Image (cartoon, rainbow, N blue to C red):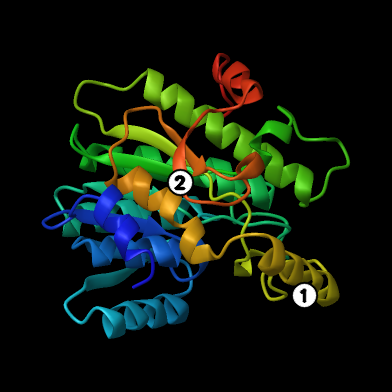
Amino acid sequence: MRYQEWYQKNARSQEGRVAVVTGANSGIGFFAARGLAYLGAEVVLACRNEGRATAACERIRAEFPSARVSYMPVDLASFASIDAFAANLAARYPKIDVFLHCAGVYYPRTTRTVDGLPMTEGVNYVGTVRLTEAVLSLLDATGRMVFTTSLTDRFGKDKRGENEGEGYAAYARSKHLLSAFVVQKARERGENQPLFAATHPGITATDLLSPDKTSHKPLFSRLGHAFLYVFTHSPEKAALTAILATAGNIENGACIGPCGLFGISGFPHRTRFCRQVLRRASRVLPK
């Protein structure tokens, strides 16, 4: 187990706690789910692809034979799937202690959700918000609701451009809106509601740009991954920001990111939401 010393210093035992991680079949979501399992939590991998999620569960069990991990299907591009997942989760668990949102898309091949929304904003923001509200009653004041956002949130615009596609601008706006949502939820936190926090992993090489997930050309994806592997940190290290947010000593409204130059890489620490996000959070967000 890499970074074991860091875990011992910065993360609390999660024995007896139930954690749900969306997008946990690969990348940051996988390593966050693996880390929570290592800390003793019972972890639910909430994913769209059953085959990949099952394989991820097997990888975690192979490394930690006593780990309690399972899979539940959810597709953030479908309101019906989100609602069904929330109902199934409530039927299985009367209480959830940690809910970590890691699922997201960038430059997706499909441009519309099942419900007709632009795919990037529909998954990264609208679907994530709908899922949050659907499961919120399962968490109490001892729980944590944590959202994976991005350094790009400071570059996001409030409104979609007239001729905008599903590329960088859409991704940045979706993360801009999501970060502002976290700020609002933290400010409005009810008496029996969980702690709300955000985490951004800096820049890391995951399969978000893989040819089977993105409409980028394969050559672009390969070059992009080569750059990321050389100049940034690994998904396993990037996931430590999520581990600190879910199992470390933080307060409501915290934003956790890497401590390196410009927040691109490094071990996690407490950082700040950018001014653009704080301004957006002072206004009513779109539903």
Query: Residue 158 appears at what percent x and percent y?
Result: 71, 27
Q: Which label's residue is closer to the chain start, 1 or 2? A: 1
What residue sits 36% from the left and 18% below the top? 188
SS label for mark 2:
strand
The answer to which image quadrant residue 64 occupies is bottom left
- Whole-angstrom CA distance, mark 1 to mark 2, is 27 Å
Q: For the view shown, which residue lies furthest in the left direction? A: 16
Examine the image and state in which quarter residue 44 appears.
Answer: bottom left
Which amino acid lies under the numbered mark 2 shown in the image of this protein?
Pro
Task: Find residue 270 and name its label.
Answer: none
In-image side of 208 versus 19 (left or right): right
At a point 27% along the width and 51% down the height, the residue shown is 9
| Mark 2, residue position | 268
Location of residue 144 in the rendering, given as x and y in whole percent from the top left corner: 29, 40
Residue located beneath label 1 in the image: 222
- Seen in the picture, residue 242 relative to 44 is either above or below; the reply is above
In-front residue for pair 219/120: 219
Name which residue lies at 36% across and 82% down: 59
